[in-house]
Amino acid sequence: MMPKVKTKKTRTPKAHRKNRAAEIANTFEWLITAFILAFVFRAFVMEAYRIPTGSMADTLMGAHFRLRCIQCGYRYDYGLGNYRLPRDTIPRGYLKPNASRCPSCGFFQSTGGTMPIANGDRILVLKCIYQFFEPKQWDVIVFKNPLDPSENYIKRLIGRPGETVEIIDGDVYINGQISRKPAKVQNEMWMPVYDNDYQPVRPQEGSREGSFNGHLWQQPFKNIADSKWKVEETNPTKFGLDSPADQISTLFYDTTIGNELRATYAYDNVGGYSYMPYCSDLKVRFYAHPTELQGSIGASLSKYQTEYNAWVDSAGDMVIEAVKDKETIELARKSIEPFAVNKPTMVEFANVDHQLIFQFGSEKLIYDLGRSPEDAGPRKTNIEPQVKIFGSGKLTLSHIAIFRDIHYTAAKFANGAKTGRAIEGNPFALGEDEFFVLGDNSPNSEDGRWWSRPGKGNNGLSYRQGIVPREYLVGKALFVYWPSGFKPFAKSRFAVIPNVGQMRLIYGGSSKNQ
């Protein structure tokens, strides 16, 4: 008897169709689930935004031109907003930039032709964070424009509920005390005034398109009296000194030749530069390279009628002192290891937010001038600050640069008489669930200082002029994930090549007491 052989049953076409239908349904189920998750993530966790204007420059860029000084090669950005185009408009094709000024060498230039336009930065915003944590001062926040809640704005958070905000000589005061920026925020806010590493290539040539503040370029650091500093013959970016250890030689930064110490922005129109206020919160930085054991090196910054000196000598004494009315007062001192010979060391001296910060290599000396408006002396805002570098012995200086702090302006236009809320003499008190915001590009920011109408609320409600209500907070700006990319071809419409080097975190407030 033959054994029975089991044969494999083949699927019927009907069963095959059922399985295929199940697979398609399963795919659609996953797609719908993914869509819902993406929607929820976008609505409640994180969302991408594009910066439409230059009100937060140079922290965040709107549509702009990427420029390079044709004299010294310094790179800087110039805002498209200077063309007074409709809000959030990015023209196709090329445009000719208006006249701009190099923020380092001071050369006024026009390209003479048209250029492509770089799009605004694209950022990631962490939403719903303020449902669980209180906003911190100095956070960069996205919120609904109180005057038109259909628009999203981005600014820096300055004042919080229950606080009184007052802007005095460019600094922010909260409840009568100066508010100091966290270190990472401060580092982002330093703006170049002069960088000696960028030397003009044709300093003695005239130009049809521009000039250095109306003259031919000269080295803006000058010797005082019998000072013995000399520009090195083989490298004009360096200064050399060969003097006795007890004989101080001084360089000063001449603002009649170099960029003035005013609250100017390379991003903005140059028309109002000469009317901008002086900024006396400054930083000078350089590298000192001693070639013998005897000597000293230091820097000097003035504010109002007081000169602050910071120096370190070969014995290891690190000192900060004040000079006023020819009287010298020592403010702070510490002993460190004597500086090394034939080794370049970074030297940095800053006067910012009523603090004197002196750094020599890894050593730091800080003196607190006080938090009240008068603690830095009677305010003489019409007195131009001064920057000096001094030393003795045999040494070389390199990588010399001057920076200024952000300076919140009190007038809507550079030479205008219209002043806003929260300025000196007009403090602005915030009530429950009220916030106050400012743009980093202070002279070119439509923010809480200038809002001229009450904010619009639901059901006919309105909000007080100048405030952002809590319910209009959208989230905290977190990361620049696509910073104005590059176009693969000259006529390409989209900048699809990422600018990886400019991807960065957006720093905000700190939980630490500043």
Image (cartoon, rainbow, N blue to C red):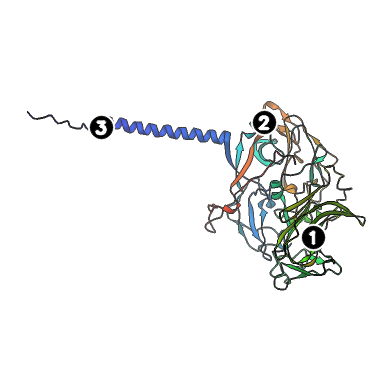
Q: Position of residue 345 (x, y in %)?
A: 71, 60
**Mark number for residue 44?**
none
Question: Image quadrant of residue 113?
Answer: bottom right
Of 319 and 466, which appears nearest the observer? 319
Q: Residues within 10 Å of mark 3 (few under 14, many from 20)?
A: few
For badge 3, the amino acid type reads Pro
Taking the image as drawn, is residue 55 in sight?
A: no
The residue wearing badge 2 is: 471
Question: Image quadrant of residue 360?
Answer: bottom right
The residue wearing badge 1 is: 315
Q: Residue at x 61, y 59 (%)?
A: 115
Closer to the chain start, of discs 1 and 2, is 1
Q: Residues within 10 Å of mark 2 (few under 14, many from 20)?
A: few
User: Which image quarter is the C terminus in?
Assistant: top right
Q: Position of residue 184 (x, y in %)?
A: 69, 47
In the displayed structure, 186 sits above or below 435; it is below
Mark 1 in CB contact with mark 3 (< 8 angstroms): no
For badge 2, the amino acid type reads Glu
In the displayed structure, 513 sits above or below 326; it is above
Q: Comparing marks 1 and 2, which lies closer to the viewer?
A: 1
User: In whole angstroms, how far apart are the C-alphas of marks 1 and 3?
Assistant: 95 Å
Q: Residue at x 78, y 51 (%)?
A: 365
Closer to the chain start, of discs 2 and 3, is 3
Residue lying at the far bottom in this picture: please name it: 233
Left or right? Give the position of 125 relative to 399.
left
Mark 2 in CB contact with mark 3 (< 8 angstroms): no
The residue wearing badge 3 is: 13
Q: Comparing marks 1 and 3, which lies closer to the viewer?
A: 1
User: In whole angstroms, how far apart are the C-alphas of marks 1 and 2?
Assistant: 59 Å
